[in-house]
Image (cartoon, grey):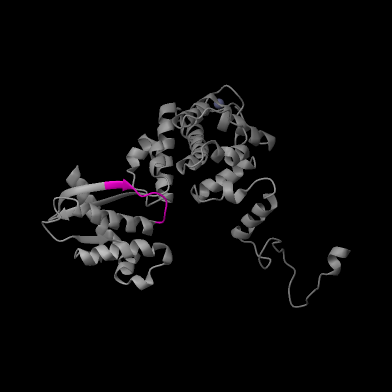
Amino acid sequence: MSLIENVTLSDFVDDFLGWSGKGDGLFSVKSCRMSFCSSSEATFEWNKWVWNGLAPPRVETFLWQLCHGKVAVREELKKRGIPVEDGLCPLCHLHEESVGHLFFSCVVVGELWTKFLRLWEISTALSQDPISILGSWSFLRKNSCIWKFIPRVVLWSIWKVRNLVVFENWKVDTSSLFFLTRFRLAKWFLAKYPLVRINSDILVGDPIIADKCQYSHVLEKTIYSNAITLATFSIPVGPGTPTLAELKAIKEGIVFFFSSKWANKGKLIIESDCKSAVDWTSNQNTTPVFFSSMVEEIGASISAKDIVLRWIPRSCNVEADKLAKEGIG
Ligand SMILES: [Zn+2]
């Protein structure tokens, strides 16, 4: 009775089924997701370990389903009364296909997990529970951006290959599975960090290389003359924003040019696709405090050495990069 005492009836509105989550009684995917997150926060940080943007949205949805035992492995189908002719794992044909077996203890996928652990020289016994894996994985290897992608990409790759075996009669090949998983890992990582300048083929071949520039991209600027590469340099920029990385690149580029044999043979024209860096240098009053000392230093060099610094659209810089790379083979 106490629940309905506070309900006010209206003659102007028909009865209807209302969504009890956030919103005006109307269902939305966002409010549904928020409801799940808030109700489970006490035990598992869903926003941190599942809905964190490290995997495509449909993969995050899959991970959420996996954590809740809502993935249609044969054991789960049987529990729901769905007739299953063969309950064995389609990858090894040795054990019943449960979430714990298919994704963790199956000999086929165990090899996949082990290969990734070995790449980072980590030796550990894996849990058979997706929630434990997702929640504890980052602690196995700290300070590695690409490491965080691995459980997501491995779990998704296992599910994809399992379905290919079941529905397309694929034969499991552990080498191909490892390659496909590394390929997916490289694509997801580069999609998340577009400023990281690593060739995707190199990353597929050696994922650990991402750790060498995990916090920022490697600076790579080239000095041109009539589209011929005269000299190049490449240095790690350390932590910081893309704008800070660009300012460092400009500063180092100036030092590099004036220490080269080309310093006395022509004028230095620097082209940057970072509009902020160019604007701040020409109008230093607008520079944020954090960058002001570096911008002042660049501005002083530009005035003293008669350098031209100009902005070019990013698309032009892509062409220049391509040209430079062709030039240096
Ligand atoms: Zn198996």
Give the vertical position of 219 relative to 159 (above or below).
below
Give the vertical position of 209 relative to 294 (above or below).
above
**Residue 304's x, y, as percent?**
21, 65
The secondary structure that most of the magenta stretch takes on is loop
Tell me which residue sits at (59%, 37%) in the image: 133
Q: Which quarter of the image is occupied by the N terminus?
A: bottom right
Is 7 or 147 nearer to us in this picture? 147
Quadrant assignment, res 250: bottom left
Q: Which quarter of the image is occupied by the C terminus?
A: top left
**Residue 128's x, y, as percent?**
61, 32
Tell me which residue sits at (87%, 64%) in the image: 2
Quadrant assignment, res 180: top left
**Residue 66's x, y, as percent?**
60, 41
Q: Is residue 115 left or right of residue 75?
A: left
Give the vertical position of 208 relative to 48 (above or below).
above
Give the vertical position of 280 relative to 194 (above or below).
below
Q: Is residue 302 left or right of residue 202?
A: left
Q: Report whether residue 72 is seen.
A: no
Q: Residue furthest top?
A: 94
Q: Which residues are magenta?
A: 234-241
Residue 235 is one of the magenta-drawn residues: yes
Q: Residue furthest bottom?
A: 12
Residue 257 is one of the magenta-drawn residues: no
**Residue 169's x, y, as percent?**
46, 30
Q: Is residue 126 left or right of residue 262?
A: right
Image quadrant of ligand 1 equals: top right
Tell me which residue sits at (43%, 41%) in the image: 185
Q: Residue furthest right?
A: 1
Q: Is residue 202 left or right of residue 232?
A: right
Is 45 or 120 nearer to us in this picture? 120
